Amino acid sequence: MGVISKYFLLPFRKKKNTILMKNKLRFLFILGFIIPTLLADVSLYAQGKVGEPFSSWQEGYLDIHHINTGKGDAAFFMLPDGTTMLVDAGQHTRPPGPRELSILPDDSRSPGDWISRYILHMLDGHAEKRINYALLTHFDGDHMGSVHPDSQDSENGDYKLAGITDVGDRIPMDKVIDRAWPDYNWPAPLEQSNIANYRKFLSWQSQHNGLQAERFIPGRNDQITLVNHPSKYPGFEVRNIVANGVVWTGVGTNTRNHFPLVETLDKSNYPSENMSSLGLRVSYGEFDYFTGGDLVGIPPAGSPEWMDIETPVGKVVGPVDVHVLNHHGYYDAGNENFIKALRPRVHIIQSWVVAHPTPATLSRMLSTRLYPGPREVFSTNITEVGTTFIGGATNNIKGQGHVAVRVEPGGKCYRVYILDDTAERFKIKEGYGPGRSEEG
């Protein structure tokens, strides 16, 4: 029995005349409750029919685009009042091989160029085509861009175009937030070529275009805010959860340092770049979303317990509706404690090698022993080699394309769409939902 017949006919199952009027009143009450809900679902579906281009963002909606270039992570957010945010802009330079993917949709442009074009397409019709916030979860090439001798020089400043600098050269950015500004010296001086190039970019853009740079501060919910009409959306929040091992406690803006003091550690035990990733929770009404770069939950055998940063993070993030797998779902991420704490309805994997995800990580995501109920797994890439590597469990993964999440005004309902990544019309290949946001 369908939703309409199930709920609309229920009041008429009792036939005694003495309760007929009561059933009519119940029927009218249920009509008043169910019809607006169904209309909301229909209106959302009408914006996302399979085979048609993904429709433009509308005020009140929260859109999250996981952009697939085959070379790393990139997520573009259009917040309810039109504020824009980019989390990572990866451009890994490892050549394609049995494990790695080629640039998508093709290698006629750089990944940073493809990311920029995607963003500008989604901003079509907006008066200002700019990125209000650009965040780097950490400083690996598949999240910020790798620099090599053949990287294209900027026509503006003394820096090369790779990942985040490529996007920032094409689209104005108001503020960049990372884990190490301004000194870039934790846990040790960060002198890699991609970081040196990024700092040149920050310097030139700040001097010539007014770009601001800040360090991500765990615990705060006022560092990333709506910039256009914040008072219209009091139920919206971005909460800074973790960076450099400093974790929000869940109380006020208080934090604690999960990692030991660097001064007490041997250099061989310094926190890795992945462990130091920043993570944030985006909340809109009852809807919650978490992303955390390459946070580690299963450190190498014999490692000290503090190298598991996922477990304390999961405790304060709590249940979410949508979760981006840490470290692309690699073997060292998505531990049992973390998955059980978040228990998401939707898992999203930003994949660029065949080991994203590994079979063990996928098994944890799907395990109803960790938490009950249905769940969906989406991946930006599903390759033939990856299918062979993972095996039959691949049937539980949906994807091969850009993965877009659209949250209705108020955050009570959301859908997930897979968009075609072979062309720039961004046609909807598949749509899933609506999902009902759960109260935390």
Image (cartoon, grey):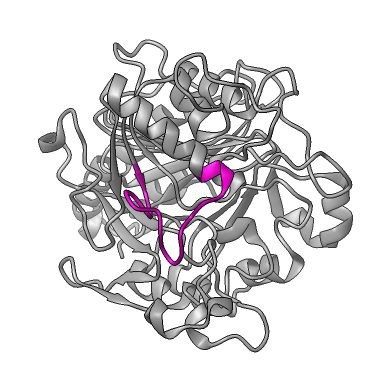
The residue lying toward the viewer, choosing from 248 and 398, is 248
Q: Position of residue 49 (x, y in %)?
A: 56, 24
The residue lying toward the viewer, choosing from 208 and 248, is 208
Residue that lies at the very extreme toward the left in this rendered image: 231
Q: Is any atom of residue 405 visible in this view?
A: no
Region in magenta: 177-195
Q: Residue at x 49, y 34 (%)?
A: 164
Q: Position of residue 374 (x, y in %)?
A: 56, 62
Side of 22 where 313 appears, left or right: right
Q: Quadrant of residue 125?
A: top left
The residue lying toward the viewer, choosing from 111 and 84, is 111
Q: Residue at x 64, y 72 (%)?
A: 364
Q: Position of residue 253 (x, y in %)?
A: 18, 65
| Principal secondary structure, stretch drawn in magenta | loop
Q: Position of residue 369 (x, y in %)?
A: 59, 80
6 vs 56: above or below:
below
Is residue 187 found inside the magenta-colored segment of the image? Answer: yes
Q: Residue at x 66, y 34 (%)?
A: 401
Side of 48 where 128 appears, left or right: left
Total marks placed: 0
Q: Is any atom of residue 135 visible in this view?
A: yes
Pick the quarter of the image with the C terminus: bottom left
Side of 51 where 178 appears, left or right: left
Is residue 335 found inside the magenta-colored segment of the image? Answer: no
